[in-house]
C-alpha cells in the first residue's frame, strides 16, 4: 500500500512537470532525428578530378559512383584540389596512374578509394566476380542502422538516470525524505515505490523511442519489437537504480550532472557505438562492468541479427543482476537517512 | 486515542518506562564530528502533558527532537518513547512529527499531500477521507484542499505541515517550531487546537523560542549549548529564579550552567 501510494505520488508529480516530461519524451526523438539526418545517408559522392586519362579509364570511372571532372592540364586540376573543390586528382604519367588525395578528411579519402577500387573491378576481367550476399543487414545499410540500436538504449539510459537521480536528490534537499522517514515506511518500500513510479515513465519512454526509430525513421530491424522493449525496460531499470543510488552521494543537482562524465560518457564509449576491437585486452575487460554494453549488445543482436530470446538471455540476466544489485545498495544507502 | 495513565501497558522487553512517562531520555549525547550538539541529556516527559523545549537557535532543540523520533541516532544514552526503545518502526506510526522546514510536495495539492502521508500510516478509504477533512478543518485549510502547495503562502504551508502531523491521530505529537511564520490570529487558533488535543490525552512536545508560547506549556525545558539547564512548570521556573518572566528566568539560568 505504501509502495503504491509512493508510485502514485511520483506519477502525479511528474505529470504536472511539463518541462521534465518534454525532456523525457521529446528530447530523445529530437536527437534521434538529428542523428538520422547526419548518419542516415549511404555516404557522400566523392569528387575526383582527372587530367590526361585514356578514355577507357575515364569511362570506367564515370560508371562508378564518383563525380568525375576532367581538366585540360594537371596544374589547373591541382589548383582546384588545393582550393578543396576536389577530393582527389587522378593522373597518368609514363603509363602509371597516380591518385593524389586531398587527405584532410579520412572519410572522404575512403570514399574516393572505394570509387577507385570499384573502377578497378569493372576494368578487370569478369572471370572472378563473386555474387555478393549478406548474412546480416542489407546492401546500402547506413551507419544510422548500424549504431541506431545502441543509441536507442543510450537515450533510455541517459535520460532516466538523470531524472531519477535529480528527483531522488530533490526529495532529500527539500526535506521531504526526512519527513517520509518519520513515517513507518520501510527503506525497501521507498526504493520499490520509486521503481514503480519511475518505471512507468521508463516503459513509456523506451517504447516511444524504439517505435519512433523503427517505424518513423525506418531504422533497420529484423527482430521482435517485444524483445526490444524488454531489453530497453531492463536498461532503464538499471539507469533508475544507479541514478538514485548515486544521488545519495550528491549534494545538489549540479553534482548529479557531475556524474555524467564519470558514469555516462565512458559507457557511451564502451557501449558499441565505436568499434572496440583495437582496444588493449585488459581495457576491453572494462566493458563487462558497463550496463550499457549489455543493453547495446542485446539490442543489436535483436535488430540487426534478428536473434530471439535465447540469443540475448545472458545480456538480459546481467542487466537484471545490475538492477537488483543497485536497488539493494540503495536500500542500504538509505540508512544514511534513518538508521532503521 | 485517549490516554489512560493507570491502564496496564503493553509488556515489552525493553520497557523501562514508568506508566506515566511518554518519553524518557537517559544520558543522551550526540555529536557531529568533533562538534558536540547534545551533552548527557536526561529528561522525562509525562503522558498527556504539553511540554515545551525552549532555547536559542543552534542550542540543539531540533537534534534532540530528531533523536526522539529515531530519524537520527544518538551516540550514547538511551531513549524510550511510548514503551518503545528508539529507534523503532512501529513507534513511528504513533508519532505525529512536524519538521522545522515544511516538507511538502509542491507539485501536489494539499489534499494529495495528505492522501500520500495518510497512506504511509495505512489510512484508507472513508477513514482517510474523514481524517483529511478533520485535519484540514483544524488548521483552517478546508477551502484550499484542491490548491497546489507550490501556490501556498509560508503560513499555509506551516499549517498544512501541522495537518500532516495530526492526520493519523497520533498518541504523541512532536512539533518543531510549529507557529513560525503564522499570523497572530491563526496562532491563537492553532494553540486552541493543541490545547484541545491535550485535553483528549495527546502528549505534545514542541520547540519554540517565543516566550509567551512557553508560558502556556505545562512544563518547559530550557536548553542551551546542548545542555538542559532547567526543567519545570513556567511558574516554578520563575519562582526558583526570582524572575518575573520566563525570558528573565531563561537569561538568569543561562549564566549558571550546570
Image: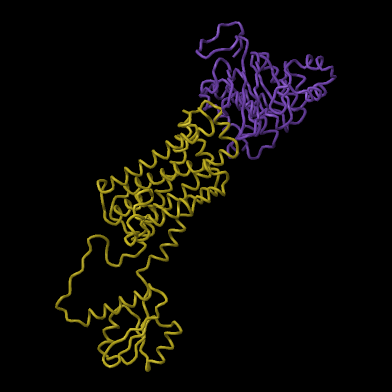
Above or below, A145 relative to B228: below
Name the quadrant containing residue B117.
top right
Above or below, B138 relative to B47: below
Left or right: B148 with respect to A189? right
Residue shown at the point (32%, 88%) measured from the top left:
A91
Q: Residue A115 location in percent, x, y?
A: 30, 78
Q: Which chain is yellow?
A: A
Q: Residue A192 location in percent, x, y?
A: 44, 34
Q: Residue A20 location in percent, x, y?
A: 53, 48
Q: Quadrant of the N terminus of chain B?
A: top right
Left or right: B180 with respect to B249? left
Residue shown at the point (52%, 27%) measured from the top left:
B120
Taking depth in this image into account, of A17 and B30 the one nearest to the observer is B30
Name the quadrant containing residue B94.
top right
Above or below, A32 relative to B178: below
Left or right: B132 with respect to B206? left
In the rendered structure, the colour chosen for chain B is purple
Residue shown at the point (62%, 20%) measured from the top left:
B27
Q: Quadrant of the C terminus of chain B?
A: top right
Above or below, A204 relative to B217: below
Left or right: A232 with respect to B159? left
Residue shown at the point (34%, 55%) measured from the top left:
A284
Amino acid at each position: 500500500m505504501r509502495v503504491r501510494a509512493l508510485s502514485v505520488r511520483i506519477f502525479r508529480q511528474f505529470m504536472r512537470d511539463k518541462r521534465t516530461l518534454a525532456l523525457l519524451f521529446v528530447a530523445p526523438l529530437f536527437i534521434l532525428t538529428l542523428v538520422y539526418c547526419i548518419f542516415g545517408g549511404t555516404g557522400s559522392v566523392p569528387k575526383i578530378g582527372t587530367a590526361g586519362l585514356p578514355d577507357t579509364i575515364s569511362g570506367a570511372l564515370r560508371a562508378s559512383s564518383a563525380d568525375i571532372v576532367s581538366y585540360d592540364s594537371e596544374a589547373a586540376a591541382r589548383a582546384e584540389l588545393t582550393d578543396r573543390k576536389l577530393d582527389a586528382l587522378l593522373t597518368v604519367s609514363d603509363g602509371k596512374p597516380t591518385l593524389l588525395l586531398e587527405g584532410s578528411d579520412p572519410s572522404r579519402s575512403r570514399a574516393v578509394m572505394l570509387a577507385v577500387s570499384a573502377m578497378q573491378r569493372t576494368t578487370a576481367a569478369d572471370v572472378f566476380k563473386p555474387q555478393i550476399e549478406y548474412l546480416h543487414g542489407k546492401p546500402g545499410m547506413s551507419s544510422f542502422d548500424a549504431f541506431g540500436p545502441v543509441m536507442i538504449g543510450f537515450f533510455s539510459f541517459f535520460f532516466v538516470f538523470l531524472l531519477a537521480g535529480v528527483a531522488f536528490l530533490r526529495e532529500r534537499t527539500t526535506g521531504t525524505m526526512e519527513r517520509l522517514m518519520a513515517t513507518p515506511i520501510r527503506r525497501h518500500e521507498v526504493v520499490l515505490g520509486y521503481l514503480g513510479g519511475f518505471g512507468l515513465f521508463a516503459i513509456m519512454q523506451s517504447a516511444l523511442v524504439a517505435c519512433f526509430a523503427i517505424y518513423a525513421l525506418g531504422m533497420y530491424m529484423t527482430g521482435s519489437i517485444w524483445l526490444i522493449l524488454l531489453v530497453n525496460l531492463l536498461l532503464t531499470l538499471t539507469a533508475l537504480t544507479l541514478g538514485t543510488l548515486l544521488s545519495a552521494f550528491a549534494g545538489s543537482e549540479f553534482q548529479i550532472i557531475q556524474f555524467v562524465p564519470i558514469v555516462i560518457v565512458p559507457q557511451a564509449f564502451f557501449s558499441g557505438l565505436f568499434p572496440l576491437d583495437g582496444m588493449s585486452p585488459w581495457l576491453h575487460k572494462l566493458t563487462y562492468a558497463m550496463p550499457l554494453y549489455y543493453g547495446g549488445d542485446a539490442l543489436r543482436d535483436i535488430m540487426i541479427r534478428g536473434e530471439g530470446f535465447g540469443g540475448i538471455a545472458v545480456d538480459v540476466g546481467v542487466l537484471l543482476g545490475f538492477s537488483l544489485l543497485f536497488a539493494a545498495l540503495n536500500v542500504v544507502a538509505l540508512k544514511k537517512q534513518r538508521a532503521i | 486515542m485517549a490516554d489512560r495513565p493507570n491502564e496496564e501497558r503493553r509488556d515489552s522487553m525493553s520497557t523501562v518506562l514508568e506508566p506515566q512517562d511518554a518519553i524518557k531520555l537517559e544520558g543522551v549525547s550526540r555529536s557531529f564530528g568533533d562538534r558536540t550538539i547534545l551533552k548527557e541529556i536526561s529528561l522525562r516527559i509525562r503522558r498527556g502533558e504539553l511540554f515545551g523545549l525552549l532555547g536559542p537557535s543552534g542550542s540543539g532543540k531540533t537534534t534532540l527532537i530528531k533523536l526522539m523520533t529515531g530519524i537520527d541516532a544518538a551516540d550514547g544514552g538511551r531513549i524510550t518513547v511510548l514503551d518503545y526503545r528508539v529507534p523503532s518502526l512501529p513507534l513511528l506510526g504513533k508519532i505525529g512529527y512536524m519538521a522545522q522546514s515544511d516538507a511538502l510536495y509542491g507539485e501536489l495539492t494539499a489534499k494529495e499531500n495528505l492522501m500520500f502521508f495518510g497512506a504511509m500510516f495505512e489510512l484508507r478509504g472513508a477513514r482517510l477521507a474523514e481524517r483529511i477533512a478533520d485535519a484540514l478543518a483544524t488548521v483552517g485549510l478546508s477551502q484550499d484542499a484542491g490548491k497546489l502547495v507550490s501556490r501556498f503562502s509560508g503560513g499555509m504551508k506551516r499549517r498544512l505541515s501541522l495537518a500532516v502531523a495530526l492526520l493519523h491521530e497520533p498518541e504523541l505529537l512532536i512539533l518543531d517550531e510549529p507557529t513560525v511564520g503564522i499570523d497572530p490570529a491563526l496562532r491563537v487558533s492553532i494553540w486552541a487546537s493543541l490545547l484541545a488535543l491535550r485535553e483528549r490525552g495527546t502528549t505534545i512536545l514542541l520547540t519554540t523560542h517565543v516566550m509567551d508560547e512557553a508560558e502556556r506549556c505545562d512544563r518547559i525545558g530550557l536548553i542551551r549549548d546542548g545542555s538542559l539547564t532547567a526543567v519545570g512548570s513556567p511558574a516554578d521556573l520563575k519562582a526558583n529564579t526570582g524572575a518575573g518572566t520566563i525570558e528573565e528566568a531563561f537569561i538568569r539560568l543561562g549564566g549558571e550552567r550546570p
